[in-house]
Amino acid sequence: MRPLQTGSIAAPGFLGLNTQDSSVQLSSGFALKAQNCIIDKYGRIGARRGWVPVNTTVNTDLGSANPLQFLFEVLIPGSNVLISGGNNKLFTGTTTMTTAVVRNSTNSGNLTYTITGNHWQAAALPFGDGSAALPHAYLVQSGHEVLVFHNLSSSGHNHDGSYGFQRLGDVGTVPSGYATNTFKPNCALAAYGRIWMADIVGDRQTVYFSRLLDGSDFQGGDSGSLSLNAVFPSNDKIVGLAAHNGFLIIFGRNNIAVYGSPIDVTQLTLIDFIPNVGCIARDSIVSTGTDVIFLSDSGVRSLQRVVIEKSLPFRDLSKNVRDELILNVASETPANIKAVYYDRDAFYLLALPTTGIVYCFDTRSSLEDGAARVTTWTKIDPRAFFVNEAKELLIGKPGRIGRYSGFYDNNAVYRLEYFTNYFDMGSPTTLKILKKIGFVVIGGGGASVAVKYGFNYEDNYLSQTKVLAGGSAFEYGTAEYGLAEYFGGIIIERFVVNVTGAGSVIQMGLETDVNGNPFSIQKIDIAVKTGKTVI
């Protein structure tokens, strides 16, 4: 009788998804499915967190069916204000959301201001703005006059006046050549002591910048404009702006321009031009502090490597899921694509609302090929992101401001699914008779875990079910009872299932409903008997 042959996957899925390469040749650290997962700081694949509602009631002007597609926090001393947008309206507040109005030029009444979309972008100088040195936030959206959220008190120098919205032209000045109702930029950036804006509908190859330390003044002092007519090809347009490492980054749809000396605008100089790669979705542009990440038509890219390495291959963070990602992006409206960097968990999230998929890119370290470790999320369906001053990740939901927290999606369970790549244990032509699969899992107290396994690239999986400690322990089929240990309040459970079936290549997976408890996979062990040679 042939002895059992054993193998282990010490850190299942820690390399993330790989749907791009030939599965049987992949390292055992890759996964073919990692749904509703993250890769934690210990390199384990585990459950993402869920979300809880922030607002206690639904604003009737928003409605429970309409998603918030814009979130931004204005840093007001002693009382920060969250601005949100949905159902063609703007709101202020968190636990209670108040419908916002736009005040007229004298702040003596309300202005008729028609909002036709929710694709706002906001920018605010962090240290205050203008002679009052009080916070101003500038909101832009294609087809809309720029809005300024600021102190509406008559003096503008005290902190006890109410804050609200007025048009930029009613508070300060719009760029020369425009009227208040004709300057309608699509993107805005607060950087280097100024507000920068670009208009993609009118003069779509010019960036306008405000006076130093006064984002409301686009005509006085050292305000001005930067033309890219001689830089970008005539058919390209500005999609978004970013600041990084002392540079101003201007993203076109198909090209990127990098300018130096943005603090002293008299010295603004083109230092690099990157052709044939651009950004296709404004709200995919996110600064991580050490890099700028964005979505191009060929995947999720790292600007840092694009700038530094120039002629060398770009750093493609989505390399291991590129074809699948590009296929999903093709069904999206670019304005609806949202992204965020959350430094507490060191991930970049890219949300595709039409497909309902969120790609989670771990940024702690790169793989050898420069790609990021990727997992996917479903069901959470964020329509906007923002990380507030308290380091909370906020998400836009229908009728709700959500906070990324806990292990329920607003009191509902969600499904974690992890599947290994196909592997042949180093012997591709030998039949393997699967006997046992062992798991070491952390957390998930009381959860019902489905262990699935299949052979020879077929999707007809066999399954065994195990209920983890913390619930009523019972087994289906021939599964064995496991051993649960408690460490620091977290359950570490080891269990083995007896299995049947045979094939030359094997795949296995684990599925469970995340039911309020954290869950991660530490290790997988398998035992097989080898059989005849199969060709």
Image (cartoon, rainbow, N blue to C red):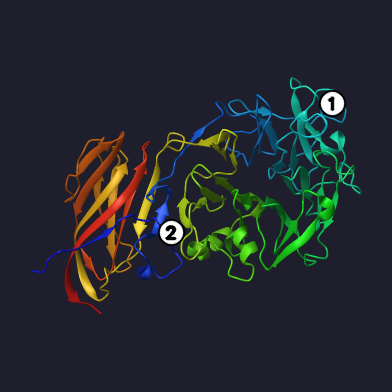
Residue at the right extreme, as displayed? 177
Q: Amino acid at mark 1?
A: Asn
For image coordinates 54% across by 59% down, the residue present is 328
Numbered mark located on residue 39 in the image: none
Q: Report the side of 452 relative to 33 (left or right).
A: left
- Dot 2 corresponds to which residue? 17
Q: Report the side of 251 relative to 498 (left or right).
A: right
Instruction: Count neighbours of disc 1 (C-alpha within 10 A) and say few if under 14, some if 14 to 19, many if 20 or more.
Output: some
Whether residue 351 is visible: yes
Q: Is residue 40 above or below residue 424?
A: above
**Under tag 1, what secondary structure?**
loop
Q: Compare residues 343 and 437 and report the one nearer the observer.
A: 343
Residue at the left extreme, as displayed? 1
Give the mark nearer the N terminus: 1 vs 2. 2
- Dot 1 corresponds to which residue? 107
Number of marks: 2
Q: Position of residue 103 (x, y in %)?
A: 81, 29
For image coordinates 37% across by 50% down, the residue present is 44
**Under tag 2, what secondary structure?**
strand
Q: Compare residues 315 and 153 and report the one nearer the observer.
A: 315
* Camera-side mark, 1 or 2: 2
Q: Amino acid at mark 2?
A: Leu
Q: Position of residue 192 (x, y in %)?
A: 74, 45
Q: Position of residue 420 (x, y in %)?
A: 34, 59
Whether residue 467 is visible: no
For image coordinates 23% across by 46% down, the residue present is 494
Q: Is residue 217 above or below residue 298?
A: above
CA separation, marks 1 and 2?
A: 54 Å
